[in-house]
Image (tube, coloured by chain):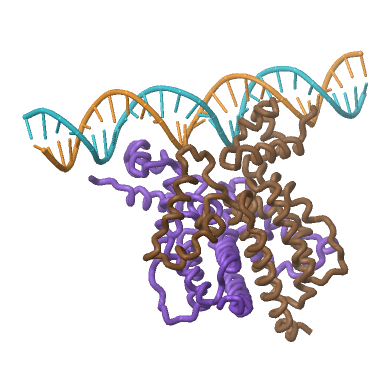
Chain colours: A purple, B brown, C orange, D cyan
Amino acid sequence: MGLDKAQIVNAAIEQIDQRGLAAFSMRELARTLGVSPAVIYWHVGGRQEDLFAEVSAVITAALADEFEPEQSWQERLRSVFRRYRHLVHQHPKVAPLLGAQMKSNGVANLVWVETVLAALAEAGFAGESLRDAFNVLIGGLSGFVTMELAPPPADDSSGWQQTFAERVESIDAESFPHTHAVLPLISNRIFVLRWQNGADVSYDSSFELLLDIIIDGLTLRAQQQGVSRR
Amino acid sequence: MGLDKAQIVNAAIEQIDQRGLAAFSMRELARTLGVSPAVIYWHVGGRQEDLFAEVSAVITAALADEFEPEQSWQERLRSVFRRYRHLVHQHPKVAPLLGAQMKSNGVANLVWVETVLAALAEAGFAGESLRDAFNVLIGGLSGFVTMELAPPPADDSSGWQQTFAERVESIDAESFPHTHAVLPLISNRIFVLRWQNGADVSYDSSFELLLDIIIDGLTLRAQQQGVSRR
DNA sequence: TTGATTAATTGAACGGTGTTCTATTAAGTA
DNA sequence: TACTTAATAGAACACCGTTCAATTAATCAA
């Protein structure tokens, strides 16, 4: 027929990409599709939450693509989380969905989970240490991406960015000496003291450092773990 | 008189704690305060976003409390991020605000930033490496907490939790061997494959592991960094 | 104490929203 | 061609955030 679920989901992604997640509206989506709102509910078979879950699934679908299998487990983990970040960066305004909504986070590809668990098993993790290692990877790295892409105010008519920038620039040297000393270096480039997010300011080197630290840390602990393995 | 901003913010926190962030409503808040909606706007001097920012500020206010200063920089960092997690866990339903809204993230205490920067400076970080180290800590650890506390569907009348649990339990052994092999160990206890969040299931050991890995990793790199310091 | 100024509060109004329901049209099938 | 299933439409319900003019309450100066 002319309209199916895939088209609805794609139109939803487009709308979020353009107007942002906070401004998303089921009725507006129906309007741009030239259709009654009820049609969306009928095709999706659920409400907004479920449509969002579909959106998340589509965006992270490429996590299921194959990797070169001859790589070390470390390199495979690096690749898969770099890919995760890359995919989310293509739709930065969807990031809050993947990081801060369980229903959207849960649809993520089973292949992704399998890839990570396989790498960790190969590294020698088992039992509770496997569980913790997995959570460290997802929680730390996906969490980083979520924070990185936390959205600024949707409608900045009251000039929040400007005001906040000025507030940062005028941080008191007496009360906050360390902060003040490195202000030009950190202003708008570290979490908390910023008015633009990772879609406008690069956090590449910070992400790579975190990736290094986590993989190295797991490598170290995997060896210790390996003793109790066989 | 009798009504001021602090009371409004506290009532808002209470409402979010009880009904969840998605169900929060300015009108409902006004109703429970026995007051016209306009009163809230007048006292807050802004809209919902700004009220949320106040909520975030109140919840993270205790980050400004003093630490024992004779501790090593490593121990001070451990303390401050354990405290961050502790504070957010007292209001788990507010977590998406702190992790996934820049306006709420940005109000976070300047003392917090100063504490972290001071520790990292003492460790020997400077320049770009200081920036990256800071982002690794906030992005990785606060990001973890955000993911950990990602809310499940607000109104689970359609039984999502049940359905999802069953879907996880019946993961195919052929297609996902590693996942299937450790299913009892990971089911509802790792990100992605869960139907309850960190308010109901403990992620303590995973968080501690991530904390260890990051602090150790920074310690290692701080020494290398220290060469170019003096 | 009165009067004037400022602080708080109200209620109504505007322009939306998500979701569900019944009725209707279009498509496919026997 | 009849009948059944798939899609769509439109109205209705019960809200929502935000703003504004009008009003009451409190404060302060004379």
Q: Is residue A86 left or right of residue A224?
A: left
Quadrant occupied by the C terminus of chain A: bottom right
In front here: A79 or B114?
A: A79
Q: Is residue B125 left or right of residue D6?
A: right
Is B103 left or right of A66, judged from the image as shown? Answer: right
Residue A206 drawn above or below residue B154: below
Q: Is residue A209 above or below residue A53?
A: below
Residue positioned 59% across, 53% down in the render: B100
Q: For the point 50% across and 40% down, which residue is it?
A: B156
Figure quadrant of the N terminus of chain A: top left
Q: Position of residue B77 (x, y in %)?
A: 75, 66
Q: Position of residue A117 (x, y in %)?
A: 50, 68
How many discs appear?
0
| Residue B112: x %, y % from top left | 76, 59
Residue B40, given in percent of the width and then of the height, sits at 68, 33
User: Can the viewer see residue A212?
Assistant: no
